Image: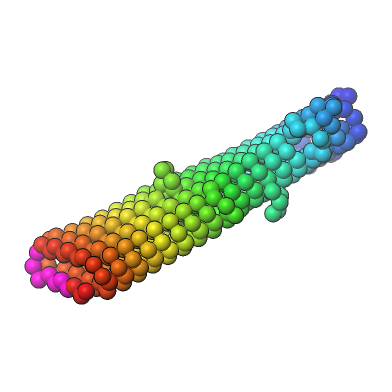
C-alpha cells in the first residue's frame, strides 16, 4: 500500500496498520503544519515527511511483528524540516523475532529552535539527527543491542541527550557519535551495557560534554577546541576494560574523569591533552590496573589525580608557569612519572603501599617537590633546575631509594628522611647557599 499526500492543510494523518510493507510520503509547504504517520503492527514500513515553514510538527510511529519465517523488519523514517521552531518525533519498536530486525530514523532540521526526539526499542536500531540553527535540541533514547546514534549540530546553544540503555537498561555493543560546531553547546551521553563507544567533538567556546558509562569494555572520547569548555567522563565497570580519552585545545578548559572498576585507562596511547592557558584536570580512578597519561601546555594549569587500588600507573606533563600538580596513589605496584617545566610550579606526590616508584623533573624558578612514600621497595628520583627550589622526601619502609639533583641558582633545599633498612640517598646541588639534610 502506498499513500502520498501533498497539501498545505493544517494536518496530514496517515494510518497504515496493520499491514505488510507500508509506505507513506507527506509533503507540506506552509506554517503550523502537522503530519502524523502511524505504521504499527507490520514490518518493512517506510515513512518520508518533508515540511517547509515555521512551527511545523512531524510524528512517526512504527512497530514490527516480523518473525524468523517472514524475514527481518526494516522500518525506516525520514523527516526533513526547513524552518524555525519545528519539531520531529519518531518512535520505532522492534518486536519481531528475526535476528536481522533493523529500524532506522533520519531527521534533518534547518532553522532555529528545532527539536528532535527519537525513541527506538529493539536490536540493531540506527538514529541520525542533523540540525543547523540556534538553540536546537536532540533527544535520543535506544534500548537493545547493536544500536547507533549520530547527531550533528551546527549553531550555538544546541543540546544533545543520548540514552542508550533507555534509562538504566542494557544496550550492549552500541555506539554514540556527537559533533557540535557552535558555542554554548551541551552534550549528555548515558550508556549502560558492555562494549559501548561514545565520541563527542565540540568546536566553539563554552561547550560542555558529559559521558556516563556503566559496564565492561567501554570507550569514551571527547575532543574540544574552544575556550571555557568542560568534559566530564564517568565510567563504572563491574569487570575490566574501560577507557577515557580527551583532547582539549582551548584555554580555561576543564577535564573531570571518574572511573570505578578494574583495568580503567585514561588517555591510553593517545593521551589526554590540554594545550592552552588556564586549563584544569581532576581525575579519580578506583580499581585495579588503572593507567593514566596526560599533558598540559600553558600557564596557570593545575591537575588533581587520585588513583586508589592496585597496579596503578601515572604519567603526566605540564609546560608553563604557575602549574600545580597533586598525585595520590594508594595500593601496591604504583608508578608515577611527572614532568613540569616553567616557573613557580608545585608538585605533591603521595604513594602508600609496596613497590611504589616516582620520577619527577622540574625546570624553572621557585619549584617545589614534596614526595611521601610509605611501604617497602619505594624509589624516588627528582631533578630540579632553577632557583629557590624545595625538595622534601619522606620514605618509611624497607629498601627505599632516593636520588635528588638540583642545578643552578642559590638557596635550594633538599630534605630527605628515610626510616627503613638498607635505604640509600644521593643529593647533588650546584649553586650557592644550598642546603641538604638526610636523616636515616
Residue 173 visible: yes
Q: Give the image location of residue 72, x and y in percent.
A: 78, 29
Numbered disc total: 0
Give the quarter of the image for residue 433. bottom left
Residue 76 visible: no
> Which of the pair 159/316 is nearer the observer?
316
**Quadrant (top left, top right, bottom left, bottom right) of the C terminus:** bottom left
How are the colours assigned in the image?
A: rainbow
- Majority secondary structure in the magenta region: strand
Q: Based on the picture, tell me whether residue 11 belongs to the magenta stretch.
A: no
Q: Give the image location of residue 90, x and y in percent.
A: 76, 41
- Which segment is the magenta one? 431-437
**Quadrant (top left, top right, bottom left, bottom right) of the N terminus:** top right
Give the quarter of the image for residue 359. bottom left
Residue furthest front as drawn: 421
* Residue at left offset 82%, top offset 30%: 68
> Which of the pair 174/425 is nearer the observer?
425
Residue furthest right as drawn: 18
Left or right of residue 99, residue 135 in this image: left
In the image, residue 403 above or below residue 200: below
Residue furthest top as drawn: 2
* Residue at left offset 81%, top offset 26%: 71
In the image, residue 39 above or below residue 417: above
Q: Give the image location of residue 4, x and y in percent.
A: 84, 26
* Residue at left offset 27%, top offset 61%: 380
Left or right of residue 391, residue 294 in this image: right
Left or right of residue 241, residue 370 in this image: left
* Residue at left offset 54%, top offset 50%: 240
In the image, residue 126 above or below residue 400: above
Q: Give the image location of residue 281, x and y in percent.
A: 42, 58
Amino acid at each position: 500500500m502506498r499513500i502520498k499526500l501533498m497539501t498545505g492543510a493544517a494536518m496530514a494523518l496517515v494510518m497504515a496498520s496493520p499491514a505488510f510493507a507500508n509506505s507513506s510520503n507527506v509533503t507540506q509547504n506552509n506554517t503550523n503544519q502537522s503530519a502524523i504517520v502511524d505504521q504499527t503492527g507490520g514490518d518493512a514500513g517506510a515513512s518520508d515527511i518533508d515540511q517547509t515553514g515555521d512551527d511545523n510538527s512531524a510524528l512517526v510511529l512504527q512497530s514490527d511483528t516480523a518473525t524468523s519465517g517472514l524475514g527481518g523488519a526494516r522500518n525506516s523514517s525520514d523527516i526533513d524540516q526547513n524552518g524555525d521552531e519545528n519539531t520531529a518525533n519518531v518512535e520505532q519498536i522492534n518486536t519481531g523475532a528475526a535476528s536481522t530486525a533493523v529500524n532506522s530514523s533520519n531527521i534533518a532540521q534547518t532553522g532555529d529552535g528545532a527539536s528532535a526526539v527519537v525513541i527506538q526499542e529493539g536490536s540493531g536500531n540506527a538514529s541520525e539527527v542533523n540540525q543547523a540553527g540556534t538553540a536546537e535540541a536532540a533527544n535520543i533514547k535506544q534500548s537493545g543491542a547493536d544500536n547507533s546514534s549520530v547527531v550533528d549540530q551546527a549553531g550555538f546553544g544546541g543540546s544533545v541527550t543520548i540514552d542508550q540503555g533507555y534509562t538504566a537498561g542494557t544496550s550492549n555493543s552500541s555506539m554514540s557519535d556527537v559533533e557540535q560546531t557552535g558555542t554554548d553547546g551541551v552534550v549528555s551521553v548515558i550508556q549502560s551495557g558492555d562494549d559501548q563507544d561514545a565520541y563527542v567533538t565540540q568546536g566553539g567556546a563554552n561547550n560542555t560534554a558529559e559521558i556516563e558509562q556503566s559496564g565492561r569494555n567501554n570507550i569514551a572520547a571527547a575532543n574540544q577546541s574552544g575556550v571555557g569548555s568542560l568534559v566530564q567522563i564517568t565510567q563504572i565497570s563491574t569487570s575490566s576494560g574501560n577507557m577515557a580519552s580527551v583532547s582539549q585545545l582551548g584555554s580555561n578548559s576543564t577535564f573531570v574523569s571518574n572511573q570505578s572498576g578494574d583495568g580503567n585507562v585514561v588517555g591510553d596511547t593517545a593521551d589526554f591533552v590540554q594545550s592552552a592557558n588556564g586549563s584544569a584536570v581532576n581525575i579519580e580512578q578506583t580499581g585495579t590496573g588503572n593507567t593514566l597519561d596526560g599533558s598540559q601546555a600553558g600557564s596557570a594549569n593545575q591537575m588533581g589525580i587520585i588513583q586508589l587500588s592496585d597496579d596503578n600507573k601515572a604519567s603526566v606533563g605540564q609546560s608553563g608557569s604557575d602549574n600545580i600538580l597533586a598525585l595520590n596513589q594508594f595500593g601496591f605496584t604504583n608508578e608515577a612519572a611527572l614532568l613540569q617545566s616553567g616557573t613557580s610550579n608545585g608538585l605533591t606526590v603521595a604513594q602508600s603501599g609496596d613497590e611504589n616508584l616516582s620520577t619527577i623533573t622540574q625546570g624553572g624558578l621557585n619549584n617545589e617537590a614534596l614526595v611521601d612514600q610509605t611501604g617497602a621497595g619505594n624509589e624516588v628520583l627528582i631533578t630540579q633546575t632553577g632557583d629557590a627550589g624545595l625538595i622534601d622526601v619522606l620514605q618509611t619502609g624497607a629498601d627505599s631509594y632516593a636520588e635528588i639533583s638540583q642545578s643552578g641558582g642559590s638557596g635550594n633545599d633538599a630534605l630527605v628522611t628515610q626510616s627503613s633498612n638498607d635505604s640509600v640517598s644521593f643529593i647533588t646541588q650546584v649553586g650557592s647557599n644550598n642546603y641538604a639534610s638526610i636523616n636515616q
